[in-house]
Image (cartoon, rainbow, N blue to C red):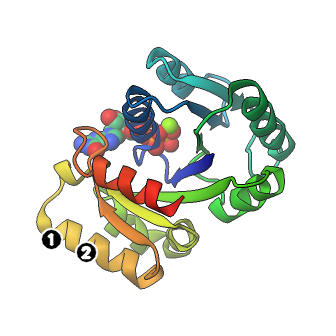
Amino acid sequence: MIICQIAGFLGSGKTTLLIKLGTTLSARGKRVAIIVNEVGEVGVDGSVIDSSGLKSVELAEGCICCSLSGSLQHTLRQITTEYHPDLIIIEPTGIAFPTKIVQLVRTAMVGEDKMITISLIDAFRAVKLFKEAELFVSRQIAGADIVAVNKIDAVDENTIDETEKIVKKVNKDAQLVLISAKNGDGVEQLINILEESA
Ligand SMILES: Nc1nc2c(ncn2[C@@H]2O[C@H](COP(=O)(O)OP(=O)(O)OP(=O)(O)O)[C@@H](O)[C@H]2O)c(=O)[nH]1
Ligand SMILES: [Mg+2]
């Protein structure tokens, strides 16, 4: 089983990407489950994911990297025993710390399970955001196995180059992939990298 978190700033496209990944892999016969975390009470992402037909559990009113860490581990174990997924995709909130979630998942994992962190970067805002909040953006990129630069359909080549430079400066070991979660560009490549990392 692969457990994959899609980390990324608010609005970077996490839900759009997980639905794309989830529905593509389900159509190929994989069992996919989703855990989505929302700090607020209104489960917008949860209902969007439900309408895509994917099996999902929503954890709300707290952050899975701190107050809801026990719920995350409990949910992982429960989904695993009841649903037997090939892949569990976790969408943390945009302000969670990816490395903390890795630690929590690792302690809940058994046997041959594999944890993979995708850090999703919004190409539309990355250069500006990096100038304003370098430490925060760096933390999100630093712990990633795969960095996916998203929304390449909405920016020019220069912006993509600048964004790639930022990613390589912070994390030169991660696999880098350029995607559009919206129109599907690069998603097949991302799936290949994900499957090869497992
Ligand atoms: N142009 C473009 N827009 C995208 C892409 N991916 C996502 N979006 C848009 O970006 C906005 C945010 O997408 P979400 O998938 O909700 O992002 P999120 O990271 O889950 O957002 P939060 O859960 O609120 O942090 C939506 O309006 C999406 O349609 C993309 O590849 N290209
Ligand atoms: Mg979301």
Above or below, 113 relative to 63: below
Q: Quadrant of residue 156?
A: bottom left
Residue 110: x and y, percent? 79, 51
- Left or right, residue 134 beside residue 86: left
Tell whether 126 sits left or right of 57: left
Tell me if residue 111 can be seen. Answer: yes
Tell me the amino acid under the disc marked 2: Glu
As rendered, which of 191 and 61 lies closer to the eye? Answer: 191
Amino acid under label 1? Asn
Q: Name the residue at 42% across, 64% down.
A: 147
Task: Please determine whether, in this image, residue 43 is positioned above or below residue 161.
Answer: above
Res. 120 visible in picture:
no
Give the SS element for disc 1: helix
Rate crowding at label 1 as few (under 14), some (14 to 19) or many (20 or more) other CA atoms within 10 Å: few
Q: Disc 1, disc 2: CB below 8 Å?
A: yes
At a point 39% along the width and 31% down the height, the residue shown is: 28
Give the side of residue 156 with respect to residue 84, left or right: left
Query: On residue 158, which mark appears?
Result: 1
**Residue under the image location 59 percent in, 33 percent down:** 34
Give the quadrant of residue 161: bottom left
Say if 55 sits above or below 197 in the image. Answer: above
In the image, residue 196 above or below residue 85? below
Work out how far the residue at label 1 is from the one at label 2, CA to CA, in angstroms.
6 Å
Q: Residues within 10 Å of mark 2 (few under 14, many from 20)?
A: few
Name the disc covering residue 162, or none.
2
**Quadrant of the image where one finds ligand 1:** top left
Instruction: State the image coordinates of residue 53 (x, y, percent, origin top left).
Output: 48, 17
Q: What residue do we see at 82% from left, 37% from top? A: 71
Q: Which quarter of the image is occupied by the C terminus?
A: bottom right
Label 2 sits on a secondary structure element that is helix
- Residue 178 point in image, percent of width and height: 27, 60
The spot of residue 134 in percent (x, y) is 49, 75
